[in-house]
Amino acid sequence: MKKIFAALLVVCMMIPVLALAEGEIKIGQADYAAHGEKCFAVLTVAVQDDVIAAAYIDEFQFMTKGDVIGVPNSDAGFGESFPEGQVLASKRVNSEYYSANMAKAGSTVALADNYAAIEAFVTGKTIAELEAEVEGKDAAAMVDVVSGCTLADTLGYVNGLIEAAKAAK
C-alpha cells in the first residue's frame, strides 16, 4: 500500500511541472551503485528540453526478515533464493527502519528526507549543469553542495541521476 501511495504521490507531484512544459518528456532510469557495494539504487528522472523536470531515488538491499517490508514476491518463490533470515527491501519503503539505523551512527536526517533533498537539487538543472557541479568534487565536498542532505554518498546519488538523465528516451 505504501509503495502504491508513494508512486501515486510522485506522479501527482510531477503533473504541475509536466503540464506547464512545452517540449517532449523523456524518462530515464539507471541502476547504479550509489552507496557502497552491498546495495543498488534505481534512479529515475523525467527530462524535458534537456532539463530534469523530476527525479526519484530508491535503493535496495538485503535487510532482516520480519523487521522490514520486502519487495513483491519476497514471501513467494522469488524469496526462496534470498540469504537465510534476509529479505530484499526498498530503503525508501522502509525509510523509518533504515533511518533508525542511520541515527545509531549519528545521522539526524531521515533517509527519505535526504533523498528528497537530492531530488530537489537535480530538478531544474541540465546534465551539463550537474556535471559541472560534481566536477572535481569528492564525496565530502558534495555533501556541502546539496542543501538539506547529509548522506556521505551524495556524490554517488547525483552521479547516478546524471546517468539516468543521459539514458532518457
Image: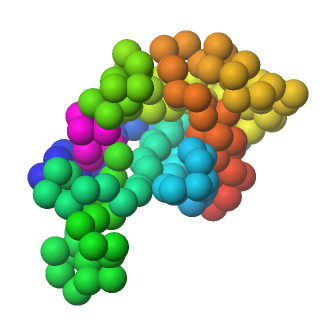
Q: Position of residue 15 (x, y in %)?
A: 36, 37
Q: Position of residue 109 (x, y in %)?
A: 38, 19
Picture quarter containing residue 140?
top right
Q: Residue at x 20, y 52 (%)?
A: 68
Q: Residue at x 57, y 24 (%)?
A: 121
Magenta segment: 92-98
Q: Residue at x 23, y 72 (%)?
A: 74
Of 103 and 122, nearer the camera is: 103
Of 73 and 23, nearer the camera is: 73
Picture quarter containing residue 53?
top right
Q: Residue at x 31, y 39 (%)?
A: 98
User: For this view, does 132 lie left or right of residue 9?
Assistant: right
Q: Is residue 24 visible?
A: no
| Name of the residue lying farthest toward the right | 136
Q: Position of residue 50 (x, y in %)?
A: 70, 41
Magenta segment: does it hold 91? no
Quarter of the picture containing the C terminus is bottom right
Q: Position of residue 3 (x, y in %)?
A: 22, 51
Compared with 150, 24 (above or below) is below
Compared with 6, 152 (above or below) is above
Magenta segment: does it hold 94? yes
Compared with 152, 98 (above or below) is below
Of 143 and 25, nearer the camera is: 143
Please count the marks in the image.
Answer: 0
Of 68 and 84, nearer the camera is: 84
| Name of the residue lying farthest toward the bottom | 77
Looking at the image, what colour scheme do you see? Answer: rainbow
